[in-house]
Image (cartoon, rainbow, N blue to C red):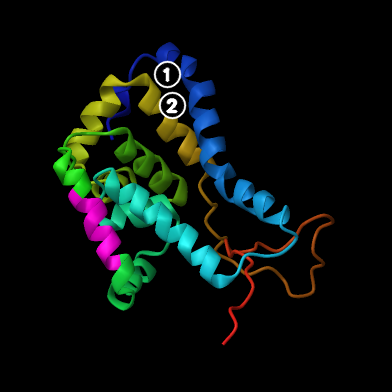
């Protein structure tokens, strides 16, 4: 990307607090869900966790996003979403209805540009996707997103904030098996969500 065409530095800097608030809000979603679940005194069941993510997919689809973008929005691997669409007829019908609702209101993947698309761009960049890949998953051409980026200090600040929170790449060398773990360091959870197994 041509960094020389960024909006003026002071304009982007003024948007940093807003951008950081948005990233914190997006990251807090799972923490909010866990806290609400704690009020019930138990872990969610697999079914409850799946239904919550399916509801997120429907929300994204109703805003004109394609399945790949809806998966990013909902925090669901795309292959899992595709499997749900094949194996759960009721869910597949609900997704088609949400897509029809979006189309009836003039929302289709890629056009017009919407805040939902910007949310997917930010989430994709935060996950480690490139600017081009984030544009494509959101349903935008890289050219269109770059044009927006050149014109919008807020989008610059959002993309920069998303890059700051993306996961670090693993080091090329393996740590010594004899080296003790540093104090206070915990192994990564890998992004898994704790759930109760459904009864057979």
Determine whether, in the image, residue 57 is placed left or right of residue 112: right
Residues packed near mark 1 inside 10 Å, few (<14), some (14 to 19) or many (20 plus): some
Residues packed near mark 2 inside 10 Å, few (<14), some (14 to 19) or many (20 plus): many
**Mark 1: secondary structure:** helix
Is the C-beta separation of discs 1 and 2 under 8 Å? yes
Magenta highlight range: 92-100
Determine whether, in the image, residue 141 is placed left or right of residue 7: left
Residue 16 vs residue 173, the one in the foreground = 16
User: Looking at the image, is mark 1 or mark 2 earlier in the sequence?
Assistant: 1
- Residue 56 position, x and y percent, is 41, 52
Q: Quadrant of residue 38?
A: bottom right
Determine whether, in the image, residue 131 is placed left or right of residue 106: right
Determine whether, in the image, residue 176 is placed left or right of residue 127: right
Q: CA distance from mark 1 to mark 2?
A: 6 Å
- In the image, residue 34 sits, relative to residue 117, either above or below, namely below
Question: Which residue is under mark 2?
Answer: 157
Q: In the rendered image, which quarter contains the C terminus?
A: bottom right
Q: Residue at x 17, y 38 (%)?
A: 105
- Residue 197 position, x and y percent, is 61, 78
**Residue 94 counted in the magenta span:** yes
**Mark 2: secondary structure:** helix
- Residue 31 position, x and y percent, is 63, 48
Circle number at residue 12: 1
């Amino acid at each position: 990307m041509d960094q020389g065409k960024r909006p003026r530095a002071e304009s982007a800097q003024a948007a940093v607090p807003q951008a950081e608030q948005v990233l914190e809000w997006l990251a807090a979603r799972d923490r909010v869900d866990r806290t609400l679940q704690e009020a019930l005194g138990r872990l969610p069941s697999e079914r409850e966790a799946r239904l919550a993510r399916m509801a997120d997919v429907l929300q994204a689809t109703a805003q004109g996003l394609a399945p790949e973008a809806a998966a990013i929005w909902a925090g669901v691997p795309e292959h899992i979403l595709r499997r749900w669409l094949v194996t759960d007829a009721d869910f597949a019908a609900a997704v088609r209805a949400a897509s029809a609702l979006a189309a009836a209101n003039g929302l289709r993947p890629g056009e017009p540009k919407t805040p939902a698309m910007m949310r997917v761009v930010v989430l994709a960049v935060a996950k480690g996707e490139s600017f081009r890949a984030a544009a494509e998953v959101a349903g935008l051409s890289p050219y269109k997103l770059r044009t927006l980026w050149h014109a919008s200090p807020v989008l610059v600040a959002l993309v920069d904030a998303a890059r700051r929170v993306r996961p670090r790449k693993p080091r090329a060398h393996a740590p010594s098996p004899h080296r003790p773990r540093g104090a206070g360091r915990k192994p990564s959870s890998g992004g898994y969500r704790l759930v109760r197994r459904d009864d057979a």
